[in-house]
Image (cartoon, rainbow, N blue to C red):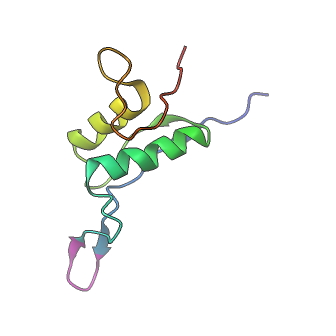
Amino acid sequence: REPPVLLCYPNSGEAWDGERRCWAEDAAGTADPVPFAHIAWECVVAGARAVGGCCRTRPQHIAAVRTCVLGDESGTFDPLGIPLLNMD
């Protein structure tokens, strides 16, 4: 039997304020795509094999995750200064 596949599908890091009925950015600033990508990277290092985004994530978040995990077109750029994963 194969082990389960770990998925990472976080929201933007903002919290829903039920009293005010709106989203509130969190103190960690994870609504910003770069810290969001860093958290996604940590999920990948912990074993996640699929990473996406849920509530309030935008294309910029997913692009930052992709660059962080796979690098840019040259395969060498990492905006967070973290070694890139070898996905081969």
Is residue 9 something one can see in this rendering? no
Q: In this view, does 41 lie to the left or right of 13?
A: right
**Residue 84, image x, y percentages:** 47, 28
Q: Is residue 63 above or below residue 29?
A: above
**Residue 59, image x, y percentages:** 22, 39
Q: In this view, does 8 lie above or below 86?
A: below
Instruction: Give the magenta range.
Output: 17-23
Is residue 35 something one can see in this rendering? yes
Q: In this view, does 84 lie to the left or right of 19?
A: right
Furthest residue in direction bottom, as rendered: 19
Q: Quadrant location of the N terminus? A: top right
Whether residue 59 appears in magenta in the rendering, the answer is no
Q: Quadrant of residue 70?
A: top left
Q: In this view, does 6 lie above or below 12?
A: above
Q: Quadrant location of the C terminus? A: top right
Furthest residue in direction right, as rendered: 1
**Residue 31, image x, y percentages:** 27, 57
Name which residue lies at 35% across and 61% down.
Answer: 13
Name which residue lies at 74% across and 28% down.
Answer: 2
Name which residue lies at 36% across and 55% down.
Answer: 11
Q: Which of 81 and 66 is in front in this view?
A: 81
